[in-house]
Amino acid sequence: MQQDYNNTINLPKTEFPMRAGLPKREPGFLEQWEQEDLYHELMKKNEGKPLFVLHDGPPYANGNLHMGHALNKILKDFIVRSRNMMGYCAPYVPGWDTHGLPIERQAIKAYGMDRDKVSTAEFRSKCEEFAHKHVDTQRTQFKRLGVVGDWERPYLTLTHDFEATQIEIFGEMAKKGYIYKGMKPVYWCPHDETALAEAEIEYQDEPCSSIYVKFHVTDDKGGKIAAITGSLDHVYFVIWTTTTWTLPGNLAISVNPAYEYDLVKVPSGEVYVLAKELVNAVMQAAKIDTWEVLGTLFGSDLELMRTKHPIMDRESVVICGDHVTLDAGTGCVHTAPGFGADDFIVCQKYDIPIIVPVDGKGMTTEDAGKYAGMYYEKSTPVILEDLKSCGALLAIEEIVHSYPHCWRCKNPIIFRTTEQWFCSVDALKDEAVKACGDIQWLPKWGQERMTSMIQERSDWCISRQRVWGVPIPIFTCKKCGKPLVNEQTIQIVADLFREKGSNAWFDLSAEEILPADIKCECGCSAFEKETDTMDVWFDSGSSWRAVIANREQQPIPVDVYLEGNDQYRGWFQSSMLTSIATQGKAPYKTVITHGMIVDEERQKMSKSLGNGIAPDDILNQYGADVMRLWVASSDYRQDMRISKDMLKHLSQNYLKIRNTARYILGNLFDFDPKTDMVCYADMPELDRWALMKLNDLVEKVREGYDTYEFHTVFHAIHNFCVVDMSNFYLDVIKDRLYCDDTTGLSRRSAQSAMYQILSALVRMLSPILCFTADEIWKAMPHVAVDDVRNVAYNDMPAADEALSLSAEEREKWSKLTAFRDDVNKALEGARAAKTIGKPLEACVTVYADDAAAAFLNSCGQDLADLCIVSELEVLSGAGEGMDSEYFPGLTIAVSRAAGEKCLRCWKQSKSVGMDAKHSGLCARCAQVVG
């Protein structure tokens, strides 16, 4: 009967599970972290170290998280966790945007409120209640992702201290003359009845009617046209527009003074004034095949000519403007100062009065004449019919154009000239652009995008016709109408808000807020409060002072702002403008942006397309660590793809990393690093090679964390686990671990190397796989310097020059690993040919030239063990076998190994049977068993 030697083999032993079960296990870790107060303990641990601050851009507290939220917060967590392990104290204060239209709209829906019927106080109370509720919801969801931070002390833009600071920033900007009230065309959302900033606009393609409309010339300023055409009876300026509903607002026709304008006679006898370069395109649109150019005038010659409006009882004057281009249309631009920025500006030069024939709800007013009382879009077909009836419609084409929409309600917006409060961006542009040059932008093209957006933007419309927000702290004299805003009034309002919050503005009268001795320059002491609230971008744009400088007492600029690439026109810019305006410098040193989330076909994810994936779905199926691995697996600076197949593949990658750690843990079951560690100098060369590969990995990983390139961190670690460890090192040392003397040098050396590898690996993984890393950390043995409570409390490993190998040694091991790959291919061929069953049944004979043979025979390694075969011999000279892929002229032959199979290590050996006591064992195993 054969003797059973299983109990003499050092088989792996571990309670660390092969299957992670992350959806069920992760909440337990969160509970532990809460109990040990992980964040504050981390801050205590790092107290006194250099400060590193990532300032959180606040999401809206108006619903459940989507994948964009998850991507953003996980990326921030990578930075916070890694910096806290790399010699810094890196606090993280999460925040929420809690005012504005997004909250209003969702609160109205949630509570079934009619905004026109509830009091301002009740409406604001419900909005605040809604915001707090969703802060709590999102906080729980963010924590479930493993994001570490000061969750019990987040910043909210509705808190009294935040609102007071915002008022003080506004006051400083007003004092410097940056704040003014003016009549200008602004983006206006009729659905939400409020002005919008550029940052609140998105463009969508939509169909529309492109029309060419004739305006009959009634006065050509001294016969300039009549001298060419003979009379003005059939002479028309032709305008082009894609917004038919704006025609009732037309007061002028703009031409470029430098352009040439042809007088084009068509077969009907009519003569059209058109820009020379656009004649062919207009004729094609009007389906006119033949025409005659009677003469040409410059745009400057046409100035102040008069035309008759085709559907309104008034004239339309011809004016000159440099904004007229030849990109499309006729070169004669429909000009409605109530509906366009360029129109407004050019009409001001000519003292043309402003007409705004659409009100805040999108309804046409009496200024629209017979079209009054209609929703602006519904006036379009009526106006078109009238243009056809009066013969003024030259041509119509159905096209698709890019049109601005409200990014909140997704409805089309209009340009509408109204009186609003503005921040003068022109006064800040040069300083802001200069500041951009001192900031690190990741990606680098961020600088160009930011500077171009600052340079091109118009003044910032900061007033909103809403009640859920921070009021604009300005009083208006009831007698003369002059605004009252100075250091005294600003401080009064700021102190009031700091004590009672911004609700006080709506609860108290101007007389109750202002001291009795405050008077207007005209002597009047009666004032009205401003009714508009501030743009929410002003709220979040004040966070650098409200949170970082005031609450946290941290220096400005902070180290990092990180948000989606839509924030160049949003939070990055509003923060920059308020900071430049008040302290003359940018609020951040580095700006990092991530892309948007798309599906596998790079289509934008949305519910309507059916390609959306909710964070909860991933958490319930795979767990947070797989979601975090998804974030780390791709270059976040581009749009991030996600799909069920990708997640499935990533879960397999996760298991490869997990099971590498599990295998090492299983082989450390009897290893105590405090007593069993083998010093580096005594280690076999293969173990030193493994530590060299680890050292290379550490260097690459630290560089990845330093430069925020988390995808290089993940791919380097994954490659190390799969290629260097599982496929090579751990495979080769398995015999040593299982079958060599339990406490002998060879086994203890392998364990020492594995321990160092695991200790470094788990710390490098910790910022990304925070749950799994902590699970491994708690399962592994430790040395005295380790903080065993949580892996996050320990330092990231640093590269050690002493663990590096020389160039010659690296070259040698590169050749040996290539040689092993060759042998493995030869073994596969032998197994396919049924020459052998398993590799340990093989005898490998290598035929090589003198140089290659000398290298292999003098490499200092047991090549049979390296290739996991029972015998391997290297001979000089030629021989039959498989040709090497790496060594020219080298061939590899495989035959069955001589001797018997050892019952313990399964190697084929001639020494099996030589030991009388253990006749079924090879000499090595017989000696170990004793």
Image (cartoon, rainbow, N blue to C red):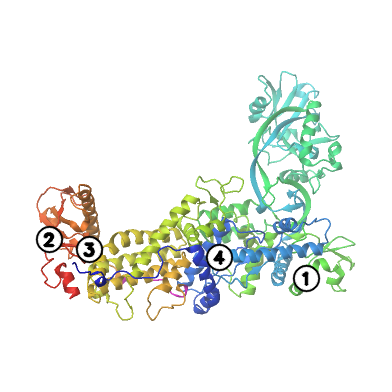
Residue at which label 3 appears: 808
Q: Which mark is residue 493?
A: 1
Going by the numbered disc 1, the residue's amino acid type is: Val
Magenta: main secondary structure? loop
397 and 883: which is toward the camera: 883
Secondary element under disc 1, as helix, strand or loop, is helix
Secondary element under disc 2, as helix, strand or loop, is loop
Whether label 3 touches label 4, CB < 8 Å: no
Going by the numbered disc 2, the residue's amino acid type is: Gly
Residue depth check, mark 1 versus mark 2: number of the one nearer the observer: 2
Q: How many marks?
A: 4
Is there any visible trace of residue 318 in the rendered image? Answer: no
* Picture coordinates of residue 385, whole percent (x, y): 79, 30
Q: Is residue 327 magenta?
A: no
Q: On the rendered structure, is 596 left or right of 473? A: left
Q: Which residue does the image show at 17% across and 76% down from the upper left?
A: 930
Residue at which label 4 appears: 144
Q: Which mark is residue 899?
A: 2
Whether label 1 touches label 2, CB < 8 Å: no
Going by the numbered disc 4, the residue's amino acid type is: Arg
Q: On the rendered structure, is 37 left or right of 182? A: left
The span shown in magenta is 792-801
Whole-Å distance between the Cαs marked 4 and 2? 59 Å
Compare marks 2 and 3 and give the one earlier in the sequence.
Answer: 3
- Quadrant of the snapshot with the N terminus: bottom left
